[in-house]
């Protein structure tokens, strides 16, 4: 199960200062900064304080590598 993981900031206006994506196997992907870039690390390597479980994608919404057409165009950012 994929989860978003968060690190609390202590600021009431912006309660979370960082977010990552837990891969469900003890590893997390997060973008630290411009110097470190995107990091793959063990979940205990950063002080995560909260998590939110993501619902599974229905198989009908999964896109296969190399797939083309309207379904792919619908996934592109604006």
Image (cartoon, grey):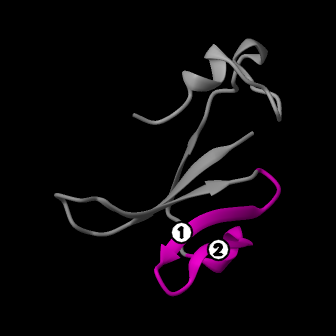
Mark 2: give few (<14), some (14-19) or many (20+) Cα within 10 Å: few
Image: 19 above or below 58? below
Tell whether 14 sits left or right of 58: left
Numbered disc 1: secondary structure: strand
Residue 50 position in % (x across, y down):
50, 55
Tell whether 42 sits left or right of 45: right
Numbered badge on residue 40? none
Image: 2 above or below 13? above
Distance from Cα at disc 1 to Cα at disc 2: 6 Å
Residue at far front of view: 69
- For label 1, the residue is 31
Report which quarter residue 67 is drawn in. top right
Image: 66 above or below 57? below
Nearer-the-camera pick, 37 or 7: 37
Residue at far bottom of view: 35
Residue 53 position in % (x across, y down):
60, 38
User: Which label's residue is closer to the chain start, 1 or 2?
Assistant: 1
Q: Residue at x 54, y 21 (%)?
A: 74
Nearer-the-camera pick, 44 or 38: 38
Q: Please report contact status of discs 1 and 2: CB closer than 8 Å, yes or no.
A: yes
- For label 2, the residue is 39
Quarter in which the C terminus is drawn: top left
Quarter in which the N terminus is drawn: top right
Numbered disc 2: secondary structure: strand
Magenta span contains residue 41: yes
Magenta span contains residue 32: yes
Magenta stretch in the rendered image: 24-46
Nearer-the-camera pick, 71 or 34: 71
Q: Residue at x 75, y 26 (%)?
A: 63
Q: Residue at x 83, y 35 (%)?
A: 65
């Amino acid at each position: 199960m994929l989860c978003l993981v968060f690190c609390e900031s202590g600021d009431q206006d912006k309660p979370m200062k960082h977010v990552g994506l837990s891969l469900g196997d003890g590893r997390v992907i997060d973008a630290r900064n411009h110097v470190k870039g995107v990091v793959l690390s063990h979940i205990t390597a950063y002080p995560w304080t909260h998590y939110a479980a993501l619902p599974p994608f229905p198989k009908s919404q999964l896109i296969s590598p190399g797939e083309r057409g309207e379904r792919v165009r619908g996934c592109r950012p604006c």
